[in-house]
Amino acid sequence: MSRKDEARMAPKTELNMDETVLQSFTADRMTYIRSSAWLAAGAMAFGMIALWAMGNPHVWTGAVGGLAAIAVRTAYLMSEELAARWDLTNQRVLGPGTKAIRLGEIKELNTLGSVVQIVTHSGDKHLIKFQADPAKTIAAIQSSQAGGQT
C-alpha cells in the first residue's frame, strides 16, 4: 500500500478545539482476502449454474471465469480498500476524505459480515469495511457515544 493511497483514504476533517482521536479503524488484510474468497466461491457457483441452465456443455468454465473475475477485482481494489481509515473521536466518527458523523447523529450500528454499518437519524449509511472484529468496533463507538473512553 502506497503512502499516496494512505493519504488519500485518511480522514481530512479538521478536529474541533476540544476533540481528540480515541481510536482508528483500518481494514484487516486477512479479512479482506477471506471476504474475497467467499465472493469468488459465490461467483464460481453462479457462473457454473448459469452455464448449466443455458445448456452449455462446458460448465466448468463458469468456475474459471468467476474465480478470474474476483481475483482481478481483489488485486485491483486491495490497495484502496486497505488504505481506508476511520477515526473515532470523543465527538465524531471521521471517515476517508471529509466524511464526518457526529456521535449524536448515529441511530444504529449494524454488522454485515466483516462490515460495520453506521446509520444516521437522517438515513445516511456509512460502511467501515473489512473489520477483523466488527463487534469490537461497534463497542468502541458505543462507548464513545456514552461518554466513555475506548
Image (tube, helix red, strand yellow):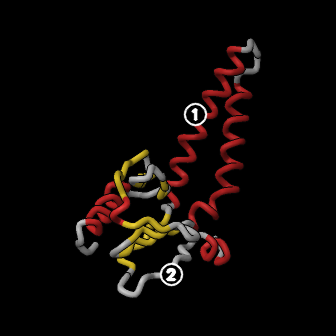
Residue farthest to the top?
55
Q: Distance between the residues labelled 1 and 2?
A: 41 Å
Query: Mark 1 belongs to which amino acid?
Result: Gly
Give the residue pinned by disc 1.
Answer: 42
Residue 50 circle label: none
Residue 44 at what x, y percent from top left? 63, 32
Callouts 1 and 2 close, C-beta under 8 Å = no
Residue farthest to the bottom?
17
Residue 6 at what x, y percent from top left? 60, 74
**What secondary structure is found at the residue carrying circle 2?**
loop
Name the image quarter holding the C terminus: bottom left
Residue 2 at what x, y percent from top left? 66, 74
Residue 14 circle label: 2
Left or right: where does residue 118 sit relative to residue 71?
A: left
In the figure, 55 relative to 42: above or below?
Answer: above
Seen at 35% across and 73% down, the residue is: 91
**What secondary structure is found at the residue carrying circle 1?**
helix
Seen at 33% across and 75% down, the residue is: 90
Query: Mark 2 belongs to which amino acid?
Result: Glu
Seen at 50% across and 81% down, the residue is: 14
| Front in this rendered view, residue 58 or 31 | 31
Nearer to us: label 1 or label 2: 2
Sequence-first tag of 1 and 2? 2
Residue 28 at what x, y percent from top left? 48, 61
In the figure, 52 relative to 17: above or below?
Answer: above
| Front in this rendered view, residue 23 or 99 | 99
Name the image quarter holding the N terminus: bottom right
Seen at 31% across and 65% down, the residue is: 140
| Front in this rendered view, residue 117 or 40 | 117
Estimate how packed mark 1 is, as few (under 14), some (14 to 19) or many (20 or more) residues with alpha carbons within 10 Å: some
Residue farthest to the front?
122
